[in-house]
Every structure is written in C-alpha cells, then in structure tokens.
Image (cartoon, helix red, strand yellow):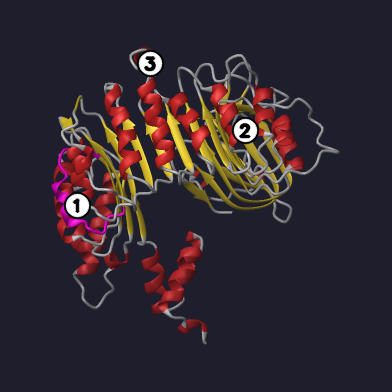
Amino acid sequence: MPLLRIPQEILGVIADTLPVEDRFTCISVCKDWSTEFIASFYRIVTLTTERQCALFYDTLLESSLYPNRRVLGRHVREICIAAYEPSTPLLESLPQLCPFVHRVVVTQNGYHSQNFQQFPWSFPILPSITHLSLKPGVTDLGWLCALPRLTWINMHWVGKTWSMGHLAELHTLCPQLETLELTITSSDVTNALDLSQLPCVPNLHRLSLQLSTGIPDAMVALWIDVCAQKYPNLKHVAINTACKYNSRFQFGADSNLAALYETFAISCPHVESIQLDDFVHCDLFLRAMIRHQRHLKSMQVSDMAEFPWESIISATARFKSTITSLAFGCKYHMFPGSSIDSLFRCLGQLPHLTQLFLAEPSSTVPMDALLDTMPALKCLTLTSSWPWLRNTVADGKPKHNLEILNFIQDITDEAVFDYIGQRCPNLRRLKLERTYIKHINDDQKLLRIQLSALKLEKVILHEVSRHSPSASDTFSVIGVQTTHDACQWYDTSKAPLRKGNVPGYVMSAGSIHDANSSKLLIQCTSLQNLYCKDTRLIL
C-alpha cells in the first residue's frame, strides 16, 4: 500500500502517537494528511483560559459554516474546560459544535460566573456523553434524564439538603453508572428514604465520597450500609470525611459501628483498592478489611490527626502477597512510637510492591535504604520527605528496577541524583515539582543532575530552585547534555519575551554570559521529552 494512501483510521492512530512538532510536519505532506493530522489536535481539548475558550469557539464555528470543509468539532471526543469564566456562547453551542464528545470535564467555578448554573441543561441534545465531571455546584439531578449512557460521573452537591432519595434518583436516571465520585457539602443531611427502596446497583465498581466536617456520624455509617446492601461488586472505595482534631472527638467507635464495617467487608468481597483520607473511622475500616478481605491490591491512607500505624502494620502483613500499591500521608505524627526504618522493614515484606507514595513522614527518607528494602519498586513519589543518603557509594550495590521517580515539595542535593543514576539504570521518568536542590559548593551557580548512564523518556521541572543556607534562586537557564548531542540551553527567565527567552528556543552554551543567572544542567545518555511545567521544550 502506498504511504500516502493509508486509511484515515490508521492515520488517526499514527497521529495520536506522534509528538506535536512531528504532527505539524505531517500536515504539509498532502491534503489528506493535512486534514487528518489537523483533526488530531481536536480529539482531546483542554481550555485553561477565557481566550482559549473564545478561540476554540470561533474556530469550530467557522469550520461548521463551510460545508466543503471538514467540521473540526466532529472530531472532539474529550473536552476539559478549566477556564475561570468560559464564554457563554461556547457552553450553549457545545452540543451542536461537538456532537460526538463523550467526556466532558468542568474544573473551575468562577466566583462571578453564572454560566455553569445553566450548563447542564444543554445536555439533552448531547446523549453521547459517557463521562461527566462538574466541579461547580449541582443543586438538581433532573437533567441527568438526558444522559442514559453515563457510566462515570463526578459532581459536587451544594443543594440545601442531601438525602438517600437523591441517590435513588441518580441511579434511576443513570442505570449504567460504573463510577460515582460525589462531594457533599450540604449542612442539612437527611435520610428520607428507606434503603429497601434504593435499587441494587451490581455494575457500580468505583465509589468516591468526600463528606464535609459537618456531616453527622449517622450519615457516614449510612453510606457504609448502602455499600454493603446495594453495591455488591465494588472494587474501589474512597472516603474523605475531612475530619480534623476538634471533630475527632464527636464520633464514637461503638460496637454498632464496628459491626457495620464487618458487614461491609463481608458483603463487598471484590474490593481491591481503598483510599481513606482523614476518615473518622479509618481504624475500624482497616480492621474489618483485615479480618474478611483477601485480595487487597492498593491501599492509600492519609490522616492529619491519628495515623493508624498498628492497623497499617497488620494490613501489610495480611495482604503481603497481593498488595502492589501503597500511599501514606500525614502532616503531624505519621509513625508514633516508630521510625522510618520500621516502616521500611514492614514494606520490605511486600514482594509485589511496585508503587509507593510517601507524603510528609515527619522524618527524612534515606534513598539508599529505601531502594535496598524494596527491590521490586517501579514507581516512587516522595512529598516533603527530604530524601538523603546514608551511604553515597553505589558501587557493589545491586541494580534497582525503579522506572518513575517524583519529588514534590522536597529538598534534596546533587549526590542523591548521582546515586540514582548509578543505582537505577531503568529510570525513564523524573519529575521535580516545587523542589529545592542543594549544591555542595554554595558559591557555584551551575548545578548538575548527573544521570549519565540513563536513557530518559520524560523529565518534568516545575518551580525547581537552587537551595543554599542563605538563599534560594529559581533556575533562569536549563540545560540538557546528552551523549550524542552538544549541550542545549533554554532560557526560562521571566524577562520580556524575545527570541532568546521563548521557552523551547534552543540556545548554544556560548551565548549565555550572565554570571548571575542560576543554571541547571541535566546530564544523561538521551532524553526524549523535557517539560517546564506544562510547556514542552523542543530538543
């Protein structure tokens, strides 16, 4: 088959896998390629500003006015509206301009915007939606009658009251629902429905609840009872009661609550993943799961007041043959009466643990000890953990299989990256977000991340700064030095835009003369993608 006669379906698959700059090149090959590769930019759309919303609306409207052209809006499958106040014409015309969109996400709630209040009412002529996320408050569910194909919904209920009658209405209007993510901030929460009137929903697999601090204890227990009686095939449960120190004491862990969680654990035998964030009954929940569950694969526990350390130890021992992902987080006393070494010994007993998320452990994290105790780990995310090294020598240590490493709100130094570069030959992705990097010599302005032996696929830098005892300087120049290419520099300073300051413009090393600018140099064998926040720098 000639290359220029590839079917459009195959061209579409090729276009979705190519980098942006390569797609721009393919647009100029021929007319058919131009049409398909232009359409690839519209399949998944994210609008973050009011101007982007206006330009997107104008482009789709213009393409729909000319019958001889391909209507670009017909290619849109997913759209995320993250602008603070999107334009009213876009919201009103979305069903006509994008008739085949199946995923709609609205993430912002403009303080002065009234558009979102009418936004759901345009859905009756957009029945193709299967995924819907509305962060702006919802006070009525009647508009869901026009979305019978909905399988995933995330919404924020701000109505005056919430009752189980609303839940029954939700499942009646959306019989195919598989994922329910619900945030309830109503101050008046009632149970105006006997649970016997609530339909059984065997196809619901994922439930996420975020309940405000004012939600009474009885309503939390009622939700657990609903799960036990009506959601027999649940696989993922996430609960956040936003519990703080003061509210902790108004909840009672009596025998009735304990029995209720026991019933839940028995009635929902397929639960594989749990996420408990500031959950008032976290300890009761974990104990019930330990006694009655067998196949827990993922566990996330975050508690600001009382971290259930003993239950965590028991859970890891109970599910050591199945757990593959763990996430722990606490702002205060995460390991009371324990230490980071005891945590590592606990996690070292999990032979299949491949993902670990550790946030604010109230203790610094020695990277060498972490890698020694968890040899199967492939994805590691550390937040506010201050990674350091007990032993900087990597020679003689076994190679580690770590592939993804994320530092978020951390302080580390060059030696940690040098150690990782020697110890983790399979590392492919590195993310540094709001992270300070310490230099051995405080007088030098050039800081190096030495990963010389690694072939990296993606590096993301967001608010990365040079840290010293006296000051912290944001890097104004970022460099990449690979084995086969000369060092390439990117000016990321906030000076007025000109040729040398546009992110993505490649600068030669000799063109940088400012001795006061802080420079970050990444040394590796190869690097495919480099991002500064959301901006991809062209290598």
Mark 2 lies on residue: 317
Determine whether 140 is above or below 311 in the image: below
Horizontal and vertical percent position of residue 158:
20, 33
Q: Dot 1 lies on which element?
A: helix
- Magenta stretch contains residue 137: yes
Horizontal and vertical percent position of residue 537:
53, 50
Left or right placement of residue 53 versus residue 31 in this view:
left
**Kind of residue at badge 1:** Leu
Question: What number is the disc on residue 248?
Answer: 3
**Kind of residue at badge 2:** Ala
Asked if residue 415 can be seen in this view, the reply is no
Left or right placement of residue 292 versus residue 173 in this view:
right
- Eye-nearest disc, 2 or 1: 2
User: Label 1: how many residues lie within 10 Å, few (<14), some (14-19) or many (20+)?
Assistant: some
Q: Residue furthest bottom?
A: 1
- Magenta stretch contains residue 530: no
Q: Earlier in the sequence, mark 3 or mark 1?
A: 1
Stretch in magenta: 136-151
Left or right placement of residue 483 versus residue 93 in this view:
right
Mark 1 lies on residue: 173
Report if the CB atoms under discs 3 and 1 are less than 8 Å apart. Answer: no
